[in-house]
Each structure stands twice: as C-alpha cells, then as structure tokens.
C-alpha cells in the first residue's frame, strides 16, 4: 500500500502554503475540503469534473507537500482532509482570511 509523506508542523512554510494556494484549481480544492469538514476523494473535491486524473493527482500532491492536506488510502481511493488545526497552529488566522477572500473573489476556471 502506498504511504503518503506529510510534512511535520515545523516543516510547513508560509511560502509553501501561499505557493500551493496560488493556483486557482488548488485553491478551489482546498476551500471545498474546508467547507466539507470531512474526508473527500480527489474526484469529490475537484472543481472540474473533466480534469485528467494525472493533473488532479499533481494538484493534490502539491497541497499535501505544502502541509495543507492529509491523504489516506481507503481501498483504491485516496481520501483527503484539510489540516486546518495544524496550519492554524503554525500561522494563526491565515487560512480564515485566505478562504474568506477566495469566496468573495472566486477564480474563473
């Protein structure tokens, strides 16, 4: 079974978080994970239903490597959840403001 690598709280950087969320697709994925507040598959969290699986995997890998999500394997499916508490511990209030602005000014895909 594939094991996913997740950075520790001390390894999460501001530039990594902002870089990961600078892409409109990744930002929409992350906002949907926060809104759902539970594990979602990659396809459930995808803002576009016709996106290639390889492209979607890339976006989730970037979010995971930035420390924004935690991915677990459930059967053949990857389940993802936002690491809100951990990121808020490292950067208090950052995600709240990013999500608020993302909802006020939605990106066009």
Image (cartoon, helix red, strand yellow):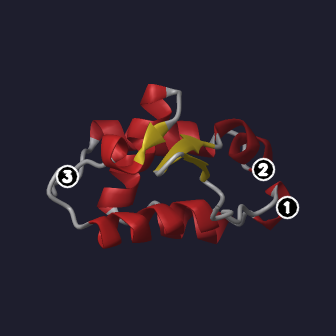
- Estimate the spatial distance between the alpha carbons at disc 1 and disc 3, rounded to whole Å: 33 Å
Q: Quadrant of the C terminus?
A: bottom left
Q: Which residue is at the front of the view, 70 or 32?
A: 70
Name which residue lies at 14% across and 57% down.
50
Which label number is shown at residue 92?
none
| Secondary element at tag 1 | helix
Measuring from the top left, give residue 27's x and y in whole percent: 39, 53
Measuring from the top left, give residue 24's x and y in whole percent: 31, 59
Q: Is residue 22 visible?
A: no
Marks 1 and 2 close (CB-CB < 8 Å): yes
* Residue under numbered circle 2: 90
Name which residue lies at 47% across and 51% down.
76
- Estimate the spatial distance between the alpha carbons at disc 2 and disc 3, rounded to whole Å: 30 Å
**Which of pointers 1 and 3 indicates the residue nearer the eye?**
3
Q: Which residue is at the front of the view, 55 or 83?
A: 55
**Which of pointers 2 and 3 indicates the residue nearer the eye?**
3
Q: Is residue 54 above or below residue 76?
A: below
| Secondary element at tag 3 | loop
């Amino acid at each position: 079974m594939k094991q996913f690598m997740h950075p520790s709280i001390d390894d999460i950087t501001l530039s990594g978080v902002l870089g990961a969320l600078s892409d409109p697709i990744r930002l929409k994925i992350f906002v949907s994970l926060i809104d759902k507040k539970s594990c979602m598959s990659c396809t459930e969290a995808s803002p576009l239903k016709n996106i290639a699986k390889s492209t979607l995997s890339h976006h989730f890998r970037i979010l995971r490597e930035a420390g924004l999500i935690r991915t677990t394997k459930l059967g053949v499916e990857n389940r993802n959840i936002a690491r809100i508490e951990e990121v808020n511990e490292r950067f208090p209030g950052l995600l709240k403001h990013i999500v608020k602005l993302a909802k006020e000014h939605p990106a066009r895909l």
